[in-house]
Image (tube, rainbow, N blue to C red):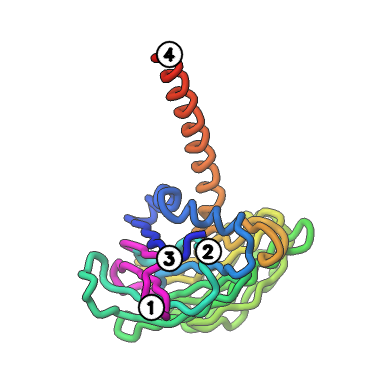
Amino acid sequence: MRTTTTRRLALSGLAAVATAALIGFGTTAASAATTDAAGTGWIRVGHLSADTKTVDVKLSALSGGATVFELDDVAYGQVSPYTDLAAGTYVVSMVPAGAPDSTKPVISTNVTITAGEAATVAAYGPNKDLQTKVFEDDLTGPAEGAARIRLIQASTDVKSVDVSTSTGMPIAKGATTGTATDYASVPAGPWDLELTGGKQAAEASVNLAPGTVSTLFVLDNAAGGVTLMPVLDSSAAGDAPEGPVETGGGGLAKESSTLRGVLDDLDAKLARLVRDLGTAVS
């Protein structure tokens, strides 16, 4: 577990998130899944302010100011995978992408990481009134054959939304900007979701695997409407503090795991090739 070494991730856009997660946070998310939870918590960061340009994010220890990880070029709608950190208080700050280190943050907030617990730090709202909020993420696994899902309302165009399944099961009712609903337990499987708020409406289809925990982010879109973005919180059943949890962000846990497996296989083959070449030369 690395808690003092800087971890940097460059995100160049939504199309490149899977690759970037593998290069950077894919490994830290995996370590969060396999590290003893004693003394360790998980944190992820989301850029949810529609009119705020791409930012660089830095998380540093409140005591001493040492930088523990950085995110580069984080664009609107991107949510990082979780990273594991020692319990304690940290400072999350954001500056315009590529700005010098001396640049005053556009926003900065303290976040306390609790051992065995996960949290999402999100920047939301219009740029002229940018805000941050820390949401507690409950990664407790659902009952067998079920999934858990909640909603984080980050739209500034629609102040309050309702979300339900096409069968009428409510997921959120009257969710206001900057709030998160409780997690709802639903049968695992494909679901069609319907969002309404003011004069706006949106639909989304999600496939919730058994044992997963997910968050639906309500975001503004370029057309002046709203959209639902599903993000995987946890893909393993069981309480996070008591056992391994495969944590992910932006729905990348499965993709990152698959890519990591490919690279591990290539590493093994390369090691065998080097060994065989050494034997041949000798």
Residue occupied by mark 1: 64
Can residue 89 be seen at all in this image of the molecule?
A: yes
The structure residue drawn at horizontal position 37% and vertical position 50%, both measured from the top left corner, is 16
Q: How many angstroms separate mark 2 from mark 1 (CA)?
A: 19 Å
Q: How many angstroms separate mark 4 from mark 2 (CA)?
A: 43 Å
Mark 4: secondary structure: helix
Residue occupied by mark 3: 4
Residue 50 sits in quarter: bottom left
- 5 and 133: which is toward the camera: 5
Q: Is residue 185 left or right of residue 173?
A: right
The structure residue drawn at horizontal position 36% and vertical position 64%, both measured from the top left corner, is 70
Give, as a single range, the part of the protein colored magenta.
49-73
The structure residue drawn at horizontal position 37% and vertical position 72%, both measured from the top left corner, is 66
Neighbor class of circle 1 (other Cα within 10 Å; few <14, some 14-19, many 20+) is: few
The label number, if any, that marks residue 280 in the structure image? 4
- Indicate the position of residue 57 as horizontal and vertical percent values: 35, 69
Residue occupied by mark 2: 84
Inspect the image, locate mark 3, and give the three-letter code of the amino acid beneath it.
Thr
Q: How many angstroms separate mark 3 from mark 2 (CA)?
A: 12 Å
